[in-house]
Image: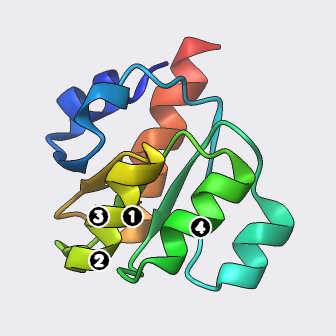
Amino acid sequence: MDIAAIVKQLNLETRSAKDRLKNMVTGGYTGDLLSDVMANSKAGDIWITRQIHQNIVAVATLKEHAGIILVNSCEPASDTLDRANQENVPIMVSKLSAFELTGKIYSMLAEKK
C-alpha cells in the first residue's frame, strides 16, 4: 500500500515531500524513543510518533522508512520540515492518538495481505 492511500483514507495532512506519497508502506512502527526506533523498525515502515524535532528525519532516512506520521495534531518544527524536504521524507499529521492511528493502519495493511 502506498502512503497516498493511507493519507486519503485517514484524512492526514501532508507537510513535506508531497511528491513521495507513492512510497510503499510494508509495515509500521510506533514509538517516540529514537534509539528504540533505530533498533527495531524496518525499511518500508511508516513511523508513528509525536516527536517533532529534526532528528526524526535522520532516523527515518537511516532506517529507510516510507514516511513519518505525527499524532495528536503535533506540527513538525520548521527546521524539521526543511530537513524532510531535503531528504525527501514525507511527514504527515493526524488528529488521532498513536493508539488509534496504529490500529487503523495495522488493519489497512492486514487487509492488503
Looking at the rendering, which quadrant does residue 108 occupy?
A: top left
Residue at horizontal 48 percent and vertical 25 percent from the top: 23
Visible residue check, residue 30: no
Mark 4 or mark 2: whose residue is earlier in sequence:
4
Closest to the observer, 112 or 4: 4
Residue at horizontal 24 percent and vertical 35 percent from the top: 18
Image side of residue 74 versus residue 64, left or right: left
In the rendered structure, find residue 58 and report the number of the disc placed on it.
4
* Labels 1 & 2 near each other (Cβ < 8 A): yes
Helix, strand or loop under label 2: helix
Spot occupied by residue 68 in the image (x, y as percentages of width and height): 44, 55
Q: Which residue is mark 1?
A: 83
Q: Which residue is mark 3?
A: 82
Give above or below for 70 relative to 53: above
State the scheme by which the image is colored.
rainbow
Helix, strand or loop under label 1: helix
Spot occupied by residue 12 in the image (x, y as percentages of width and height): 19, 46
Spot occupied by residue 96 in the image (x, y as percentages of width and height): 24, 63
Q: Which residue is mark 2?
A: 79
Q: Amino acid at mark 4?
A: Ala
Spot occupied by residue 43 in the image (x, y as percentages of width and height): 73, 41
Q: Amino acid at mark 3?
A: Asp
* Labels 3 & 2 near each other (Cβ < 8 A): yes
Closest to the observer, 4 or 95: 4
Q: Residues within 10 Å of mark 2 (few under 14, many from 20)?
A: few
Give above or below for 75 relative to 82: below
Helix, strand or loop under label 3: helix
Q: Residues within 10 Å of mark 3 (few under 14, many from 20)?
A: some
Q: Residue furthest top?
A: 113
